[in-house]
């Protein structure tokens, strides 16, 4: 018998089962499509269906136990350092959510108080982001930033169309375009593709810190540009994109050409970090050119997954035909989101945070996240094996070193505002000297080896024109305490040390690597889709 190159594990299991074991099947009789359960004997069942609905159900308690156990195979959220999504809220928030789990936000008639809380959240965000008048601002909850980004883009597209029509110009030849950095999160590119707007990706570089370069962006702007997406907190390195500089250049452009191009800020993460940790930064509605902002309530908004927000600086920037009037008995409500029904609970959780944490609470969490991110960044930099590409641990160049009367300098190390602005993200790679000493060692092994210790730390390839720069990225969230950071660093150092040692089992990987040297993992490798030139990866 010759060895197979490919083996189908499901088939293997099917062929290896006891024959005639069918008499206990309460739930399923097609065992090949089902997964067996450890408590089968006790509950009188042998398997759970995977591909078809069982003809007869099972008790709620049994169903619970079966599904509960299957889900126990998921990774541990606290060791998942790949995701920006918040995974913990205090117990009273859980209670509030449970109490309101069956409420639908759209049923404004039945749940007027829920609607009121939704409106309060929009006002709070409009105020936090310095909308000229909280009365004039308008916004809505969404499922996350992705939906919010579609809505922000649609509004800009509609305004561009209205302007073109008013000028008697074509909206079809050559059609609208939108400008963003090549580091854009996939949701931004989705808008362009789903809503038929040409996507103009501005190449990023080491000099632009892997994010939008406003000067370069101007080469992509023309009379058919509906807007520029500027990201507050690049998903890959955490750098804020320079909103103010982009706005200034678009001001100059308007003076020269008479064409006004708006900015939508994708503040998925940063719009809940900058107001608290970097209050001096100019990025929000204080800049007249910023017409809309989105954020993810479930990232640094610290709610559970399922809530995002989009806010327009005033009603003038949300075209009327995107707003639907819903007529109820005696009242009219307005809807401008992609979903009709939407769970109210995550929105209530968002409001809980506003009331519970307040400005000071959010500020304390953001500063603590940044402090822990600095700790990890410095330690990695000091190791000599790694180079850190994010900058939040580097002191700001100006105005921070003040000589005191002792002739020494004062530097408040604990004040996040003394460091470069950015998200609490640590992006790092093998240092140049490490790569020279150990050319056979591939960085993606660090991701794989950390996984064996339970950590999820992705290794990404940066944009294509960056000549194969790969980064490992750690997102510091509230649950990433100092103790956890210490543990993670310990594991990174141990793994790296092990991989260097010639006689260690880990080093056997270097042999593997010799065979797959040219096969450096693209970020979307294996997804079956063509490499699009941007980072298309879950975040
Ligand atoms: C996470 C993220 C998104 C998508 O947000 P969701 O809330 O996951 O839909 C968009 N842009 C950026 C910069 C992000 O980090």
Image (spheres, rainbow, N blue to C red):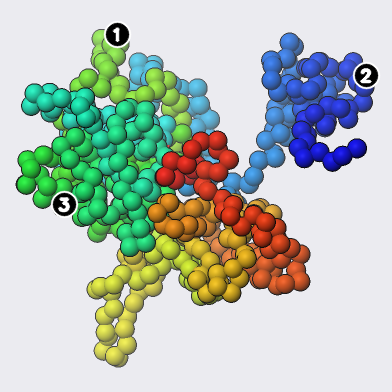
Q: Is residue 234 visible?
A: yes
Q: Is residue 33 left or right of residue 308?
A: right
Asked whether mark 3 lies closer than 8 Å to ligand 1, one says: no
Height in image: 250 above or below 223? below
Of the image marks 2 and 1, the number of the one nearer the N terminus: 2
Of the image marks 3 and 2, the number of the one nearer the N terminus: 2
Q: Is residue 87 left or right of residue 420?
A: right
Residue reaching furthest to the bottom: 406
Q: Residue at x 29, y 14 (%)?
A: 326
Asked whether mark 1 lies closer than 8 Å to ligand 1, one says: no
Quadrant of the rendered image containing residue 446: bottom right
From the image, tell me which residue sits under label 1.
329
From the image, tell me which residue sits under label 3.
249
Q: Is residue 58 left or right of residue 2?
A: left
- The residues bearing labels 3 and 2 have C-alpha atoms spaced at a distance of 75 Å
Height in image: 147 above or below 432? above
Q: How many marks?
A: 3
Residue 35: percent from left, percent from top: 77, 27
Residue 289: percent from left, percent from top: 17, 44
- Secondary structure category for the residue under label 3: helix
Quadrant of the rendered image containing residue 418: bottom left
Residue 27: percent from left, percent from top: 78, 17
- Secondary structure category for the residue under label 2: loop
- The residues bearing labels 1 and 3 have C-alpha atoms spaced at a distance of 50 Å
From the image, tell me which residue sits under label 2.
20
Q: Is residue 127 visible?
A: no
């Amino acid at each position: 018998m010759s060895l197979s190159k490919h083996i189908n594990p499901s088939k293997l299991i099917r062929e290896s089962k006891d024959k005639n074991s069918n008499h206990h099947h309460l739930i399923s009789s097609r065992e090949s499509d089902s997964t067996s359960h450890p408590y089968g004997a006790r509950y009188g069942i042998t398997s759970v269906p995977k591909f078809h609905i069982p003809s007869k159900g099972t008790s709620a308690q049994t169903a619970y136990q079966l599904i509960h156990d299957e889900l126990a195979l998921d990774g541990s959220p606290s060791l998942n350092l790949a995701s920006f999504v918040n995974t913990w809220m205090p117990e009273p928030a859980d209670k509030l959510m449970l109490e309101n789990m069956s409420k639908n936000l759209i049923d404004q008639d039945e749940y007027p108080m829920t609607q009121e809380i939704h409106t309060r959240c929009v006002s709070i965000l409009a105020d936090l982001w310095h909308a000229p008048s909280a009365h004039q601002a308008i916004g809505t909850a969404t499922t996350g930033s992705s939906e919010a980004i579609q809505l922000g883009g649609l509004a800009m597209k509609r305004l561009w169309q209205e302007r073109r029509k008013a000028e008697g110009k074509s909206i079809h030849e050559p059609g609208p375009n939108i400008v963003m950095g090549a580091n854009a999160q996939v949701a931004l590119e989705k808008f362009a593709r789903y809503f038929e707007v040409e996507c103009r990706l501005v190449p990023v570089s080491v000099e632009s810190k892997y994010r939008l370069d406003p000067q370069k962006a101007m080469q992509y702007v023309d009379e058919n540009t509906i807007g520029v997406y500027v990201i507050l907190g690049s998903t890959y390195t955490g750098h804020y994109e320079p909103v103010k500089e982009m706005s200034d250049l678009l001001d100059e452009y308007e003076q020269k050409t008479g064409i006004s191009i708006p900015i939508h800020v994708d503040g998925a993460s940063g719009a809940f970090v900058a107001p608290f940790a970097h209050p001096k930064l100019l990025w929000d509605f204080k800049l007249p050119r910023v017409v809309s902002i989105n954020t993810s309530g479930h990232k640094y908004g610290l709610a559970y997954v399922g809530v995002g927000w989009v806010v327009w600086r005033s009603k003038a920037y949300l075209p009327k035909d995107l707003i639907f009037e819903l007529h109820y008995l005696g009242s009219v409500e307005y809807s401008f989101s992609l979903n009709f029904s939407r769970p109210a609970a995550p929105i209530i959780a968002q409001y809980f945070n506003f009331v519970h944490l307040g400005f000071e609470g959010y500020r304390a969490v953001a500063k603590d996240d940044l402090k822990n991110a600095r700790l990890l960044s410095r330690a990695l930099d000091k190791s000599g094996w790694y180079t850190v590409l994010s900058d939040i641990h580097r002191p700001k160049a100006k105005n921070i070193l003040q000589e005191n009367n002792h002739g020494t300098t004062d530097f408040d190390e604990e004040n996040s505002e003394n460091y470069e602005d950015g998200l609490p993200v640590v992006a790092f790679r093998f240092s140049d000297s490490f790569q020279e000493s150990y050319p056979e060692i591939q960085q993606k092994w660090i991701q794989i080896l950390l996984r064996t210790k339970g950590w999820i730390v992705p290794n990404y390839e940066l944009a294509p024109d960056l000549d194969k720069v790969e980064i490992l990225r750690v997102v510091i969230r509230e649950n990433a305490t100092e103790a956890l950071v210490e543990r993670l660093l310990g594991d990174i150092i141990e793994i790296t040390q092990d991989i260097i040692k010639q006689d260690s089992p880990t080093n056997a990987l270097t042999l593997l690597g010799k065979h797959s040297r040219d096969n450096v993992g693209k970020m979307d490798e294996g997804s079956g889709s063509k490499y699009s030139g941007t980072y298309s990866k879950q975040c």
